Each structure stands twice: as structure tokens, then as C-alpha cells.
Amino acid sequence: MRGRKDLLLILTGAAIAGAAVFCLSLYLGPEGLSMPGDEILRLRIMRALCGAGTGAALAAAGVAYQTVLANPLADPYLLGSSSGAAAGIAALSFFGVSRAGLIFPLTAGLCSCLTVAAVLKIAGRSFSKKNIILSGVAVNLFLSAAVIFMVSIRKKEFFSVMYFMMGDLGETRLSLIAAALMIAAAGSLFLFAKSRFLNALAAGKTLSRQLGCDWKKESLAALAAASVITGAAVSISGTIGFIGLMAPHIARKFVGSDVRFLMPAAAVSGAALLMISDFAAKNILFPQEIPVGVITSMLGAPFFLWIYKK
Amino acid sequence: MIEFKNFSAGYTDHFVIQNINCRLVSGKIYALIGPNAAGKTTLLRSLIGDIPRSGGEITIDGQNIKLFSARDLAKKVSYAPPEINPAFNYSVSEFVTMGRFAVNRAFWETDEDIEEAANALITMDLADVADKAVAELSSGQKQSCLLAQIIAKNTDIILLDEPAAHLDIKHRADFFRKILSLKKNADKSIIITFHDLNDAINAADSFMLLKEGRLTACKEKDGITGGMLSELYGTEVLISEFPDGRKAVLPRFARAENTI
């Protein structure tokens, strides 16, 4: 059995890898490695923070969704959790609430919780893997349409449709970033502390009972935490698909499925994956920038099919 | 000791099993048998509180199981489903060690947890595949994993739901040999549902006969006759005994020409 030492080793390795990608994203531009000016460096730091924070948060939520539902296909985006959060944010903006502080991430988290609850309700009691994804995708489409509807009515004072549909790591309000990342970190730490409960839940309802885990209570708590984390991530970066699907699977290849090791490894994978995707989004068609969600979906959708076929 | 008092249970208001009354003692293997859809699995899963509706009560050592927390119940009762399809690549040793979660919920396992799990792996001949993913194992080995997890938990009551359904004759023999030695070495009540009555009559000490949700008999093995099984299943069944004490349960396939 692996123990504390292995976790320390994984954390060290992950921290080094994460820090490397973070630093690289500050100094790597379209012209290769260079020392950027102060203003550009400041923007790049913000961008890297958004990318790393959002990626890690989506990955942590993905680990929780996948493990609790014992469903390798689960992901904040496919479950409708992200678009629930986006709809909450769009509604706040629609009614003219200014975009700062705690209210955005918290509202997004709440809407995300409600959406996941609705999706699971629609999918039915048996929690079948395909039903959950199908109802998630349908709810996702519906909410996305609702968001575009709201954006269309109030074009002027709104951020772009792109932000909602494909994500945007250009957020620069430090108070919003700080609030969202703190919420996401608190949620992730809660899930990490519950690692062994999540392991038991991954065995399915009946087996988790025989392991002494109150299935209903524990899965509700974990799903709520994952949804709040997703809401926080969406409130700074919009809906970015498939990070929460890919990062846990990549991490599983390296550290296995035990959530105690998987959660930190997946968070770093998610952070790195999103920062790398963002780099690609900025530079593939330079000087034109494409939305980061285009890159993550181009990688993620085939990845989804690969997991589905496996 | 387990006691069912006028116990009924099901998934809706229509109960699948009804008015069960019986008393099970420790140190015995009980065979829970009956036709398909008689409610065998419902009865087993009621004992781990996994059936949504129930009436009457089940007591363990005199205490109503409804008053137990999920964790306290798991410390007394273990349940193995007929098969498992793990969603992720948990290793055999991780899976077996999970059994200790019912006992110790700290973030890390204690040395005792790890030792108990290691012993369980050896008991079930899984030490060689300890680092493999459970999902990659054969059905027989998956059943062994489930039993190893239960051995690591070390509960007084063990429920096995058709454990041999997917095993060939050698693995079946190995499996039940281990169940018998488990009973012998530790004073446990083991309830097993059987698909194959030959396994049941050679492994169990007592029989619980379940038909259409009702318990029609709860008897020692010697009290079970071919006639009772014939009536239970609605087809003619014969029990024959070999000189070494083994028994066989035989259905009749061909229509007899000159029955009396």
C-alpha cells in the first residue's frame, strides 16, 4: 500500500511540473522565449493564474463527478454543471449586477448545483452512465441557448457570447479572481479530505454501503462541492469543456485511481493542460487569437469518444 | 444472532418479501434458495439496509438494524454482490484494503489495517495479483477480491449473493473450500444464495427456502428432502447421497415411461 511518502513524492513532482508550465507561460510568446515588458508580464501573470486556477478547479470537480457517479465519462461540461453556472452569471449580468467579488462565483456555484440535481433527477434513479451523460448534454444545450437568448437581448452591456460558449482567460479583476480561486480551493480541499469516502463511493451504491459509507449523504456532499468548484471556475473563465474529463484520466495513468493521490495529480494536470491549450489558442493563428475552448474541445471530444469506446 | 421479526421489504409499497420470521445463529452457513425472483437478493440486501422500504424488523444481537448508522451496520455485516464491474483501475490491494474503511476512517490506513488486508490477500490467493487492476481479473478472481475485502473487514455476518454463478467447477470448489475454512476458523454466520443446489447441499449447514417472497421453511440440511425442493421449484427433484457423504441434487429432464 502507498502512504504519506508517496503522496509527498507526487505532490513534489506535481508542484515542479506545474511551476514549470506556469513560468513558461509567462515568458513564452509568439516570438519564442523572451523577457516581456512590465505591463505584458502583469497581464500574462493574471492569465496564467486564471488558466492554472480554472484548470485545477475543473479537474478537481471532474475527479469528484467521475468518482461519485462511478462514471468515467462524467465532466462538469458534459453534466451541464458548467452551463448551469454560465446561465447564473448571464442572469446576474442581465439584471445589471456588476461583475466583482463573491456574488458571481457563489451564484454560479448555486446554479451549478441546481443544474446537476436536475440532470440526475432526469436521468433517473438507476444512475445509468449513458442516461446521465445524455440528460447532461440536453440540459447543457438548453441552458446554452438560454444564455445566448439573454445575451442577444442586451448586447451592449454584456461580455461576449464567446466567453460563455468557449471560455476566455482574459479576466483581469483581481478581486473576482481571488474570490473565485479561494472558493475553488476550499471546495477542492474538502473533497481531498474526503478522499477515502470518494474511493468507497466509486465502488457503487451497494458496495459503498457495505464499506460503511452513507451513500446518499456522502455523494450529495461531494456533488455539491464539485458543483460549487465548477461555478467558481466558470465565473472567471466561462465554460471551458473537457478539462474535467481529460485531466483525471491522464492523472490516473500516472498515480492510479486512489483519490488521495489522484486529486492532487489531476489538479496539476488540469492546470497544465489549460495553460498549454491557452498557449496554443493564442499562437496557432497568431496574431489572431482563438477561444481556448476551441482547443480543449478539439482535444477533449475525441478523448471522450476514446474513453467511451474503451 | 440475526432475527427476522415479521419482516417485509421492497422497492415500492408493494413488498417483494413478506412476513419473514426466523432466527439465524452464528457458526453456520445458511443456504438461501428459491426460484428466480423469489426475493433472495432483496432479503440479503435488507440486512445491509440497502432496500428502501420495509416493515417489521431485523435484529442483530437483539438490536434493531434500523437504529444502526451506516458505519456501525457495516462493521457487523458484509455483503458481496454476484459480480462487480469496477469503473476505474483500482488495484486489488487497494480494493481489499478499502474493506478497512468501515473500521478506520482516518485519512491513512494504520499498520493494523495494512496487515489485515495483506493477510486477506494471502488467504484468498491474491498476493500475486495484488498490484493488478481489479477490472482486469477473471470473474473467479473478482469474487475472491470481494471475499478478501470482507475478510479484511472481519465482520460477524457475511452475505454472499450467488458467489459461484460465474465460476467453473474447479474455482467453485476452491471458493467454497475457503468459505468452509472461514466458518471453521472464526465463528461467523454466513448466508449464501445459490443458483446451483449441488453447491448448496454440499456447503451449507442449514437451508432457508424462499418462494414468492415468503419463507416456506428454515431447516437443518438433514431435514431437507427432495419433495421439499420439488415443491419449492415446481419441478421434480431428487436428492441422492454418495458413500463418502457428498450429496447430489438432480432434476428430471426426460419424462419417465413407467412412473408409479
Image: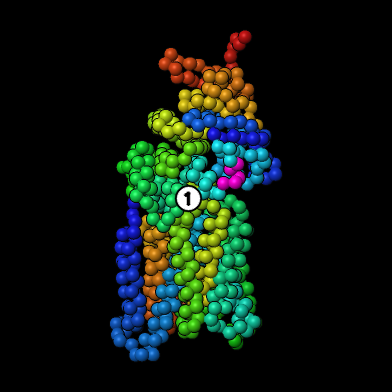
User: In this orientation, which residue lies closer to the viewer: A300 or A17?
Assistant: A17
Residue at x-position 62% and y-position 68%: A142
Check disc 1 and report its element: helix, strand or loop.
loop
| Residue under the image location 63 percent in, 22 percent down | B231
Q: Amino acid at mark 1?
A: Ala
Residue B208 shown in magenta: no
Q: Residue at x 39, y 90 (%)?
A: A39
Q: Which residue is mark 1?
A: A203
- Asked whether B149 or A19 is in front, the reply is B149
Whether residue A158 sits left or right of residue A41 in the image: it is right
Mark yes or no: residue B179 visible: no
Percent position (x, y) of residue B17? 64, 36
Quadrant assignment, res B218: top right
Magenta segment range? B64-68
Tag count in the figure?
1
Q: Main secondary structure of the magenta part?
A: helix
In the rendered view, tell whether residue A70 sits above or below residue A42.
above
Q: Which percent across, then down, holds residue A113?
A: 58, 66
